[in-house]
Image: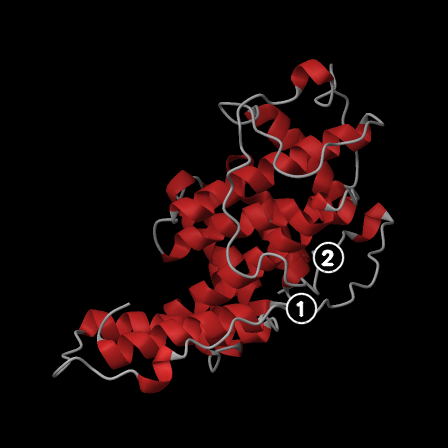
Amino acid sequence: MAAAAFPPLPPQFKSIQHHLRTAQELDKREPVVAYYCRLYAMQTGMKIDSKTPECRKFLSKLMDQLEAMKKQFGDNEAITQEIVGCAHVENYALKMFLYADNEDRAGQFHKNMIKSFYTASLLIDVLTVFGELSEENVQHRKYARWKAAYIHNCLKNGETPQPGPIGMEGEGFDAEREEAGSSSLHSGTTQPSSSSTCEANNIPTSNYTGIHIPPGAHAPANTPAEVPHNTGVTSNTIHPAPQNIPLVDPSLYSAQSAGEVRLTPEDFARAQKYCKYAGSALQYEDVSTAVQNLQKALKLLITGRE
């Protein structure tokens, strides 16, 4: 599965190059996430161009790689069951987002944090493999991608970014600027710009302070995004902080079903989803999110209500 075995990336597939690069970076540490990054690239590439010879050749190689990974990790539930895979990718994307967001709010601006923001946005793209994105994930993707470009440009121009959700440009940032910022995040290079995005008159004016951070937002993220080897940046060790564990709802101890509860197939599917999310959260030592999801599943199964 070496990258050298692949033909050159066709120009038509420029939009998925960073998803493929992220997959390569995560092959050893998060093979499940790497698999879905490639699956997203495959599906997106098929929609872009599946007829041009160079594109067909590239997609064929990518398909072979996916089949090899599926065979290698065939006993992994996150590969064989979409609901588990979705929870796994979503939790890892959230982990990247929270690491970057905590660093940002603390005023700790560095390349590793910028790349974590951008990686989170790419992984939220990948979630479309499982269906339509929730509005929450749409907002996280927009915010993370904008933050990555904003902080990157500030540091490049020797200026200090403003921490936290200070706002966003009304229509999002320019696509050309996004591509330039994205490329430099992965390559470790900087690209010239005609003006600074950090100047006072360029600070976004539309309010974006209402961004919703999911449960466990300030739980420690112990695995920041891996920095490319050619950046020369090393990440400091992140020491886990104490977590605020939610109390178990006392009513669950004495909860009784109101009459004969008839659970529908949809109820069982939702309960299963909560349990899978809890299991995935535990992989990242996020006890708070795990407890919350387990309580939701238990309440649904006992009372038939959420």
Q: Is residue 238 left or right of residue 138?
A: right
- Quarter of the figure that contains the N terminus: bottom right
Q: Where in the figure is residue 185, as x and y percent of width and height?
A: 71, 41
Q: Name the kind of residue labelled 2 in the image.
A: Glu
Dots 1, 2 in contact, CB < 8 A = yes
Q: Name the kind of residue labelled 1 in the image.
A: Arg
Q: Where in the figure is residue 104, as x and y percent of width and height?
A: 71, 44
Residue drawn at point x = 52 percent, y = 71 percent: 246
Residue drawn at point x = 16 percent, y = 79 percent: 258
Q: Can you say whether 19 is above or below 85 in the image?
A: above
Residue drawn at point x = 53 percent, y = 50 percent: 213
Q: Is residue 254 left or right of residue 232?
A: left
Q: Is residue 6 left or right of residue 228?
A: left
Q: Callout 1: 10 Å neighbours few (<14), some, many (20+)?
A: few
Label disc, if present, on residue 74 of the rendered structure: none
* Residue 69 appears in the rendering: no
Q: Which secondary structure, mark 2?
A: loop
Q: Can you say whether 85 is above or below 73 in the image?
A: above
Q: Callout 2: 10 Å neighbours few (<14), some, many (20+)?
A: some
- Find disc 2 in the rendering and name its residue: 226
- Find disc 1 in the rendering and name its residue: 29
